[in-house]
Image (tube, rainbow, N blue to C red):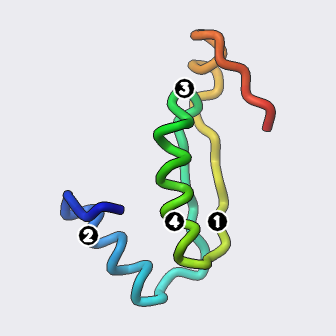
Amino acid sequence: MDTFSNEEKISKEYLENDNAGVIVNIVHASNLSRNLYLTTQLMKYKKPIILIVNMIDMAKNIGIEIDL
């Protein structure tokens, strides 16, 4: 949410104007550390967050095991 791209600017503006009732955050399982950083940024908006972990099969293929 550093507002470098137009997509980030629009998303941040939408969240700041209190238009969202819930945030759906889809994260790539093989790169959780990067994706969960965004999750922590989204938490500042005090909205319920649904976290979807995608590509678990790819993570398993490279030896990452996730305890959901």
On the image, the x and y values in percent for residue 34 come to 47, 39
Q: Are marks 4 and 1 in contact (CB under 8 Å)?
A: yes
Give yes or no for contact between labels 1 and 3 (Cβ–Cβ under 8 Å).
no
Task: State the CA–CA distance, disc 2 to disc 4.
Answer: 13 Å
Q: Quadrant of the N terminus?
A: bottom left
Q: Which residue is mark 2?
A: 9
For numbered disc 2, what is the local secondary structure? helix
Q: Is residue 7 left or right of residue 11?
A: left
Distance CA(mark 4)–CA(mark 1): 8 Å
Crowding around mark 3 (Cα neighbors within 10 Å: few <14, some 14 to 19, many 20+) is many
Q: Secondary structure at mark 1?
A: strand
Precedes in sequence: disc 2 or disc 4: 2
Front-lying residue, 43 or 30: 43
Disc 3 to disc 4: CB gap under 8 Å: no
Mark 2, Cα crowd under 10 Å, few <14 / some 14-19 / many 20+, is few
Determine crowd level at label 4: few under 14, some 14-19, many 20+ residues with C-alpha closer than 10 A.
some
Amino acid type at mark 4? Leu
Secondary element under disc 4, as helix, strand or loop, is: helix
Q: CA distance from mark 1 to mark 3?
A: 20 Å
Determine the residue positioned at 64% across, 20% down. Answer: 57
Q: Is residue 9 left or right of residue 63?
A: left
User: Of label 1 and label 3, which has the lower sequence position?
Assistant: 3
Relative height, residue 52 to residue 19 (above, below): above
Reading the image, the residue beneath label 1 is 49
Q: CA distance from mark 3 to mark 4?
A: 20 Å
On residue 57, the disc is none
Residue 18 screen position, x and y as percent? 48, 88
| Disc nearest the viewer among 4 and 1 | 4
Q: The disc labelled 2 sits on which kind of residue? A: Lys
Badge number at residue 30: 3
Marks 3 and 2, how far apart in space?
26 Å
